[in-house]
Amino acid sequence: MNALNMYDGINFQASFFCILIFLVFIFKGFFNNFNLFMILTLLFFLIYNYSNKAFLGDSGTQLLSFIISYLLIKSYNNYKILTPEEIFIILSLPGLDMMRVFLIRLFNGRHPFRADRIHLHYLISDKLNNLLAFIIITTQVIINLLLYYIISNKVLVFIIVVILYILLVFLFKKKYAKHEKII
């Protein structure tokens, strides 16, 4: 829940990420009607999000993360449709970013839930713009999923996903003044 809430920093990002998750469920043949309904709802929402007339906010991300968590747990526990490795890869980008942000905040003596602009989407959008940040991050999520489904060695996929995330962070990291704390 925290990772998706923190992932919702720029338009499209969290809602489109949820659409990708619901597409994975449809691809796996799991509750297709419900997932299609969620995708259509989020596509309708994206129209308003594009024009800055609607935002997910805390309530939207909490609701979506609850629904997705429930479906992920149910798909694994009851139907063995998704593996734990697959679930990790699906959630890897928001999860890795949340862990990185929390560690930086704690290392710098700040509260881990204090808002700032050190999330990956802000690092990218500060150097480029919000649309390109959305495209780059969404492309990375899709690459992560494709790697999982193409490469049979799941440990290798995990290593590649983590390395790609680290490369994105270093590619767009901020340059700090000598007096600023960094990790």
Image: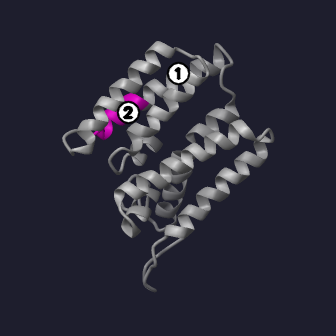
Q: Residue at x 26, y 41 (%)?
A: 49
From the image, tell me which residue sits under label 1. 71
Q: Is residue 65 above or below residue 6?
A: above
Q: Position of residue 94 (x, y in %)?
A: 51, 46
Q: Which image quadrant is residue 115 in? A: bottom left
Q: Is residue 124 above or below residue 11?
A: below
- Judged from this view, the residue extending furthest toward the right is 153
Helix, strand or loop status at disc 1: helix
In this rendering, is residue 38 above or below 103? Answer: above
Specify start and end residues of the magenta stretch as a single range.
Answer: 55-64
Locate residue 114, reporting x and y percent: 36, 56
Q: Residue 114: within the magenta?
A: no
Among the two numbered marks 1 and 2 on one chain, the one whose residue lies closer to the N terminus: 2
Measured as percent of width and height from the top left, residue 180 is found at 43, 79
Kindly identify the amino acid type of the residue bearing the numbered disc 2.
Answer: Gln
Residue density around tag 2, few if under 14, some if 14–19, many if 20 or more, within 10 Å: some
Q: Main secondary structure of the magenta part?
A: helix
- Answer few, some or many: residues within 10 Å of disc 1's Cα (few below 14, many 20 plus, some between 14 and 19): some
Front in this rendered view, residue 146 or 167: 146
Q: Which mark is residue 30?
A: none
From the viewer's side, name the closer residue of 171 and 47.
47
Decide which of 13, 98 is in the foreground and name it.
13
Residue under the image location 40 percent in, 69 percent down: 127
